[in-house]
Image (cartoon, helix red, strand yellow):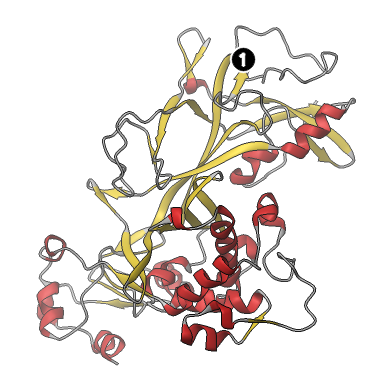
């Protein structure tokens, strides 16, 4: 009998279609019984699976597939870090109708899975393809910023949130058939799987490439966890409003984990990306505008005076607002339900941090001299008095454009520009300029006007 197919974004499916979870579809309940394992993941006689151990930075949440001395994201010492063992990529699952739904089933649905998000920055010729910046309020550095196109974002399902031993990760699976083993709390009379060999434990993982921005607090220990949680969702809401996006287009995760919030990973969830996060690094005042908008959304008045004085105590509550810690008109949404208990817009620490963000500026890291010496165009640009190019190329439809001025949203290349590339640049708010094949052809007037006004 043929079945029907349900499609879900993989970052949602890792939890919604997790091992032995329930799916409600067209009036019926289905239980996820097995993972569809491709032949190449089986080893030997099929009784083992080709899993991978991964190492996660305890400071920023960066993912490494090998044991390393230092984190590739933040340079934190990682020698001796304990890995998450036996991860296995799961892309498709199968479910079957179930007739009995027990109280334990409903409790499993309510509690959900323990999902952890990690990232890896892209590399080219052994070099990280990352734009680094610092966010400063006056002389105080608040955030270290890193942005990359096509960062690899991974989500791991470490087990049920209410599992007995929180140090044990993963689920038991039959390596030959892909059937998930039952958990201890399930009714023994529910549907039977075929005869199984000795199960192996794996940690399901899904991966995708997304444009991503990491906002790493310079001194996270100075803030309460609820402060970082609230500011995370305030900034995400501010981004959505400033850049006229749906909430689902920009998502964020606390890193390295929900119970150890030291950074915020924001990523463009939609296919192709919205082209917005790069502006938060390129434009010195973009994060400030987002923070200001967030304060407006949080039912505050007298915002400009508070920003001017750098004092959150000057903020005033709007009259006739019934909101206390948060509401669906300010910070609460379907997408941040797991964090609702930690969101508190009334916190004085939250308000002061947002005021500091509204007052500050983003400072891009200067391009290293070694990076600027390879092209004859560099000297031509300098001689013409153009601003220095950025630390990493722009990217449109997956193609690197070697010369980029993010502060101006301008890029230039001596290679051919396809109509698709030009359209992608336009969609992201960039001007893409064609250069002559060699510097002898001179700098196009269009580029000079865009960069020098």
Q: Position of residue 299 (x, y in %)?
A: 68, 77
Q: Position of residue 380 (x, y in %)?
A: 11, 79
18 or 305, which is in the foreground?
305
Q: Position of residue 71 (x, y in %)?
A: 31, 42
Identity of the residue drawn at 66% across and 26% down:
163
Regarding mark 1 in the picture, which secondary structure is present there?
Answer: loop
Circle 1 Cα neighbour tier, 10 Å, few/some/many (<14 / 14–19 / ≥20): many
121 or 133, which is in the foreground?
133
Q: Is residue 394 left or right of residue 353?
A: left
Residue ID for mark 1: 174
**Image quarter in which the N terminus is found:** top right
The answer, for residue 270, to whether it is visible in the render is no
Q: In which image quadrant can residue 233 be found?
A: bottom right
Q: Is residue 61 left or right of residue 406?
A: right
Q: Is residue 59 above or below residue 165?
A: below
Q: In which image quadrant can residue 7 be found?
A: top right
Identity of the residue drawn at 31% across and 62% down:
132
172 or 400, which is in the foreground?
172
Identity of the residue drawn at 20% across and 76% down:
388
Q: Is residue 165 above or below residue 234?
A: above
Q: Position of residue 235 (x, y in %)?
A: 55, 67
Identity of the residue drawn at 66% across and 23% down:
164
Q: Which residue is most to the front?
A: 313
**Image quarter in which the C terminus is found:** bottom left
The answer, for residue 337, to whether it is visible in the render is yes
Q: Is residue 254 above or below residue 92?
A: below
Number of numbered labels in the structure image? 1
């Amino acid at each position: 009998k043929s079945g029907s197919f349900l499609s879900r974004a993989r970052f949602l499916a890792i939890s919604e279609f997790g091992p032995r979870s329930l799916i409600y579809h067209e009036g019926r309940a289905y239980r996820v019984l097995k993972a569809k394992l491709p032949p190449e993941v089986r080893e030997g006689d099929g009784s083992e699976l080709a899993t991978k151990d991964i190492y996660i930075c305890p400071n920023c949440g960066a993912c490494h597939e090998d044991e390393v001395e230092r984190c590739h994201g933040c340079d934190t010492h990682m020698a001796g870090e304990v890995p998450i063992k036996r991860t296995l990529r799961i892309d498709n699952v199968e479910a079957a109708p179930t007739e009995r739904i027990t109280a334990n089933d409903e409790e499993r649905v309510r509690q959900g899975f323990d999902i952890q998000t990690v990232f890896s920055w892209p590399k080219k010729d052994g070099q990280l393809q990352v734009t680094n910046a610092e966010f400063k309020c006056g002389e105080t550095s608040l955030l270290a910023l890193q942005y990359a196109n096509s960062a690899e974002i991974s989500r791991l399902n470490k087990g049920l949130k209410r599992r007995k031993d929180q140090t044990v990760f993963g689920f038991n699976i039959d390596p030959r058939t892909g059937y998930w083993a039952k958990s201890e709390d399930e009714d023994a009379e529910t549907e039977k799987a075929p005869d199984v060999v000795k199960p192996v434990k794996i940690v399901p993982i899904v991966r995708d490439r997304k444009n991503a921005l990491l906002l790493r607090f310079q001194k996270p220990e100075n803030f309460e966890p609820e402060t970082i949680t609230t500011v995370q969702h305030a900034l995400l809401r501010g981004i959505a409003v400033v850049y006229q996006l749906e909430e689902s287009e920009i998502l964020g995760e606390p890193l390295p984990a929900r119970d150890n919030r030291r950074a915020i990973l924001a990523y463009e969830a939609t296919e192709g990306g919205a082209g917005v996060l790069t502006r938060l690094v390129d434009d010195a005042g973009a994060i400030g505008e987002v923070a200001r908008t967030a304060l407006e959304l949080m039912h505050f008045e007298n915002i400009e005076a508070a920003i001017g004085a750098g004092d959150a105590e000057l903020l005033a509550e709007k009259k006739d607002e019934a909101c206390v810690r948060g509401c669906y008109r300010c910070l609460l949404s379907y997408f941040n339900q797991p964090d609702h208990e930690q969101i508190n817009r009334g916190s004085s620490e939250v308000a002061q941090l947002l005021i500091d963000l509204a007052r500050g500026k983003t400072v891009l890291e200067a391009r290293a001299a070694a990076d600027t010496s390879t092209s004859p165009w560099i000297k031509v640009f300098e001689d013409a008095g153009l601003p220095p190019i950025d630390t990493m190329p722009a990217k449109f439809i997956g193609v690197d454009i070697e010369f980029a001025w993010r502060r101006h949203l301008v890029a230039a290349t001596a290679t051919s520009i396809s109509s698709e590339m030009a359209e992608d640049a336009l969609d992201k708010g960039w001007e893409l300029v064609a250069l002559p094949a060699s510097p002898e052809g001179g700098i196009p007037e269009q580029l000079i006007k865009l960069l020098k006004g």
